[in-house]
Image (cartoon, grey):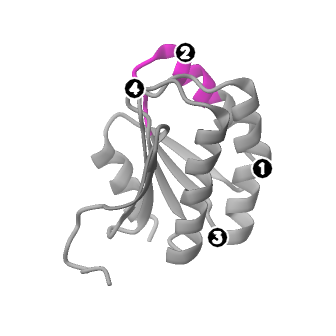
Amino acid sequence: MLNLFDRREKPYYQNTAGQVAYSPAGYVQLNWSSERISLTDMQQLYEQALQLLRSTRVGKVVSEHGQRQPLSAEAQTWITQNWIPRAMQESNTHYCAIVEGHNPLHRLATQTIVSNAPAGFHFQRFGTLREAAAWLQSLG
């Protein structure tokens, strides 16, 4: 059982793509690695995030990009056409705060995902995790 007074994130799943964690502040957090990752590893990380979103019913995600490598076109398509629609339907997830990555090519790939996401899924981009978390918390 989670201690509601403990504000630290709780690790949930980790692979070479990164880590999925639950924040008692009311969101699921994806912390991406700087490694080149396979499509399978990326999909597994997102599937674990969806499982956590379903079980917690928080409906909000922070994606901490940091040093994440740019995603392939195939990965971008899978996120926008597969994962996001399922997250919206299966866990009532509609908000994603993105903590910008350092790589300009990565930012371009992120913009493609943001532009191609289904209507009703809302992104905001931030420079820090603190700003991203504050936005999600302001949503209630």
Query: As shown in the figure, which amino acid type bears the numbered disc 3?
Result: Ser
Residue lying farthest top? 104
Q: Earlier in the sequence, mark 3 or mark 1?
A: 1
Left or right: where does residue 87 sit relative to residue 25?
Answer: right
Q: Earlier in the sequence, mark 2 or mark 3?
A: 3
Q: CA distance from mark 3 to mark 1?
A: 14 Å
> Which range of residues does the magenta coloring cover?
99-111
The label nearer to you, 1 versus 2, is 1
Residue 68's place in the image compared with 60, above or below, is above
Query: As shown in the figure, which amino acid type bears the numbered disc 2?
Result: Leu
Taking the magenta stretch, the answer to whether it contains residue 102 is yes
Q: At x 61% / y 27%, what residue is drawn?
A: 71
Q: What SS does tag 3 mark?
A: helix
Q: What SS does tag 1 mark?
A: helix
- Residue 91 is marked as 3
Q: At x 51% / y 61%, what residue is drawn?
A: 60
Left or right: where does residue 68 sit relative to residue 5?
Answer: right
According to the image, label 1 marks what residue? 82
Q: Position of residue 80 (x, y in %)?
A: 74, 43
According to the image, label 2 marks what residue? 105
- Nearest the eye: 116 or 1: 1
Q: Position of residue 85 (x, y in %)?
A: 76, 56
Q: CA distance from mark 1 to mark 2?
A: 23 Å
Q: CA distance from mark 1 to mark 4?
A: 24 Å
Residue 137's place in the image compared with 33, above or below, is below
Q: CA distance from mark 2 to mark 4?
A: 11 Å
Residue lying farthest left? 5
